Amino acid sequence: MRNLLGWTHRESPEPELLTQAVRDHLACVEERMAQLTRVKEHLLALERQAVSSAAREICEERPGCGGS
C-alpha cells in the first residue's frame, strides 16, 4: 500500500491506471485474507484434536469414566 501511495504522489497517474492498481492491490489483500482464514481454520482443527486427545487420556486414567 505504501508503494501505491508513493507512486500516486510521485507520478500522478491517470485515473484508469490508479483504479487498476487499487483493484490489483485489493485482489492481493483478499487472497492473503483467504490464506489467513485457511490457516486459522487449520489451527482451530488442531486445537480441537488436541483437546479431544487430552480428554480421552484423562478419562482413561479415571475409574468409571468410560476408560479401561
Image: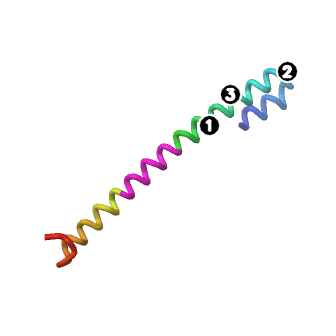
Check disc 2 and give the amino acid type: Glu
Residue at the outermost bottom position = 63
| Cα gap from disc 2 to disc 3, whole angstroms | 15 Å
Q: Is residue 62 left or right of residue 38?
A: left
Front residue of this view, candidates 65 and 40 = 65
Q: Residues within 10 Å of mark 3 (few under 14, many from 20)?
A: few
Q: Earlier in the sequence, mark 1 or mark 2?
A: 2
Q: Earlier in the sequence, mark 2 or mark 3?
A: 2
The image's mark for residue 30 is 1
Check disc 1 and give the amino acid type: Glu
- Give the residue at mark 3: 24
- Give the residue at mark 2: 14
Q: x, y (%) of residue 11?
A: 84, 24
- As for residue 11 lying within the magenta part, the answer is no
Check disc 3 and give the amino acid type: Asp
Residue at 73% across / 37% down in the picture? 2
The image's mark for residue 42 is none
Q: x, y (%) of residue 23?
A: 71, 29
Q: Which residues are magenta?
A: 37-48
Q: Is residue 59 left or right of residue 3?
A: left
Q: Secondary structure at mark 3?
A: helix
Residue at 78% across / 33% down in the picture? 6
